[in-house]
Image (cartoon, rainbow, N blue to C red):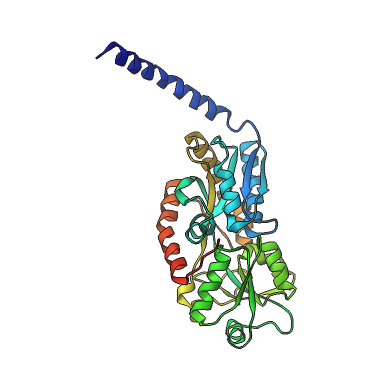
Amino acid sequence: MKRRDFIRTLSAAAALPLAGAAAGAFADTYPSKPIRLVVTQGTGSGSDVIGRLLATKLGERLKQSVYVENKAGGGGIIGHQFVLEQPADGYTLLLSTTAPLVVVPAMNRNARFRLNDFTPVAAALRSPYLVLVGTGPDSPRSLQELTRRLASTPSSYSSSGTGTLTHLATEMYLQQAKVEATHVPYKGSGQSLADLAGGQVLFSTDSPIAAGALMRGGRLRALAVTSAQRLATYPDVPTMAELGYPGLTLNTMGGLFGSPKLPAAVVERIGTEMAAVLSSPEVKAQFASMETEPLAMPVEAFRAQMLKDAPVWEAVVARLGITAD
């Protein structure tokens, strides 16, 4: 071995313990300052409600502040690209779900990211969707009545944003029912559902989390749910499969993600604490009240499931012919 190569080998070998020591020191001190949790929908959306709950409970476990920062717009593009631009130090995390990570990049060329660009940190949730209408005297009382109305009268529906599953699920229903409606996208569920309750649009599809308060207040009514079984909270609401739409049994899956090359120590620490958060009786009860499943699964299994689901949703986007720029 040449002397120059020997020196390089020796230097590399000497650096290994130092790198290990640095990683160990980082693991011992992380987190040493507040952690930002980016939510890509607006205040009052299902993602926002879940994000604030997880931030509070995760902060208690970490003994460090975890705060939500809403970065809505572009079907999640703005928030996701923001996170990719942040240092890979574990102090900016992202709460994301199937739609912005998989669906939006498949339909919008402005999305300069793909699922593999992010580091999965922890699984968090799985949730179905509700087909919703207002409670005014002219609002449909059933999905069958809604379908007949759409077949005879020009109407519109709202969503929490172009490319979200609230958008995609509605388009799947319209295609299978062979009817049409004009899409009115919003920057999050809050304003979308407020306008639905106010009668500005005829119907919408959204999560039980986002719709819960307005339903309890008597301003929204659910006509159907996309889960495989009826929900315990809304036992009188039939599933889409019961109503003749077996292809509309779908859920969103979500969790925490970080920048590329996020340190393994961050993934391990956040993953450990998230598992404890999701298994706590208090959080389980709050998730149950929102008809959302706490998704406690190993991060590698979570990543594998997301990758398995990606081509399925990409095929749906291609079949529906939905694009957004």
Residue nearest the observer in this picture, 38 or 151: 151
Task: Name the residue located 35 percent from the left edge and 17 percent from the top edge.
Answer: 8
Q: Is residue 294 above or below residue 175?
A: above
**114 or 227: nearer the eye?**
114
> Can you name the residue that lies furthest to the left here?
1
- Residue 53 in the image: above or below residue 209: above
Whether residue 252 is visible, yes or no, is yes
At a point 58% along the width and 60% down the height, the residue shown is: 292
In the picture, measured across the screen, residue 175 lies left or right of residue 282, that is left
Residue 284 at x, y = what percent?
Answer: 59, 55
- Specify the quadrant that holds the N terminus: top left
Question: Which corner quadrant of the image does residue 185 belong to?
Answer: bottom right
Q: Residue visible at 60% across and 57% down?
A: 74
Q: Nearer the viewer, residue 194 or 161?
A: 161
Q: Residue furthest top?
A: 3
The quarter of the image holding the C terminus is bottom right
In the rendered image, residue 173, in percent from the top left (x then y), is placed at 52, 76
Question: Residue 165, percent across and down?
Answer: 55, 64
